Amino acid sequence: MLKGLAITPPVVGRIAIGRIVEKAGKRLPEKDDQFTLTTQVQQRGEWMLHPLNEQLRKATSGKLRAIPVRVLFNDPDLNLRADYSLFDRDTGRPVCVGDGQTCKRTTDKGIEALTCASPDGCAFGRQGGCKPYARLNVLIGDEDEMGSFVFRTTSFNSIRTLAARLHYFAAVSGNLLACLPLELKLRGKSTTQSYRSAIYYVDLSVRAGSTLEEALTQARELDARRKAAGFDQAALDAAARLGFANGAFEDSAEEQAAVAEEFYPPSEPQKDPQKSDGNPPPTESGATTRPTLREKLDRQAVLLGGAAA
């Protein structure tokens, strides 16, 4: 095994809830309210759709907001790897990756191990745009039982929800997480930061039409069949753990540029609040929301009141 090269789960496709669009000569991320499955091949700057994308859409009415999945590992932290990450927006390379206690930072002396105070408590992180970044690997379909789809996100809501669900399902199943029939779901919520407009995050649940008790029964049956066939889940988890630890940074050099483009776009220059164009700031999901009618009327009332004074 080559030292310094992270060995990650084989990926056959991507799960996205948005895409990159060109605006004013810049390629910027644009969020969506449904899932899209793509291959790992780009054509004319856009990811090509995976054949499963159309199959899943035909099986549902309306938008694709639920995907039946399984996970590869019984250890929740192997399926979802989350850390605080800062990428160089010009080169796409990771500059600093930490877990809130320690971090690996690229410096003139190479990669150094330093303390990590999280983005809120780190001047270096705040200046460079450090934020939570996670990757979730899941299995879709039965064609390739080791080939996964990867979902990448910097949404705090998605990361927190997925981490909680994975740990809870692992606990209630008696460490049979990899055998549970699960479903990725897209949920919406409104917050003060989103100006009460809907933002979307990814959740994990048992599959529609099934109860938790039924899912647990299926997991025990699948675990028994796998053991009878000689499937060693514990050895698979151990191999994955060693593979992730083999490199300083998980994403390969080929993936880093795409990750930086989608999740760490060039920051816009700060605007004077007195010269605002009236558009609210981006939400935590990266999307810009428009003001509501009430907010427009309130703003107009303030302006008219100032003019009358």
Image: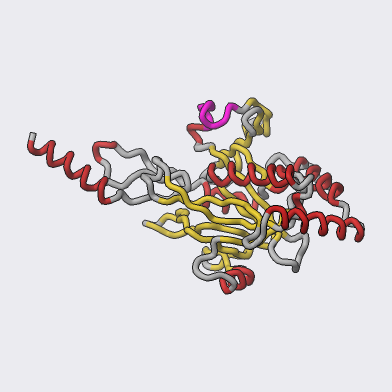
Closer to us: 18 or 171 = 171
Residue at the spot 56% in from the left edge and 58% down from the top edge: 16
Residue at the spot 59% in from the left edge and 44% down from the top edge: 161
Where residue 91 appears, x then y in whole percent?
A: 56, 46
Q: Is residue 63 left or right of residue 173?
A: left
Q: Quadrant of the C terminus?
A: top left
Q: Is residue 248 magenta?
A: no
Start and end of the magenta stretch?
A: 117-125
Q: Is residue 118 magenta?
A: yes
The reply to whether residue 144 is visible in this rendering is yes
Residue at the spot 46% in from the left edge and 46% down from the top edge: 266
Closer to us: 308 or 125 = 308
Where residue 184 appears, x then y in whole percent?
A: 61, 56
Image coloring type:
secondary structure
Q: Is residue 230 left or right of residue 293?
A: right
Where residue 28 appears, x then y in whole percent?
A: 45, 54
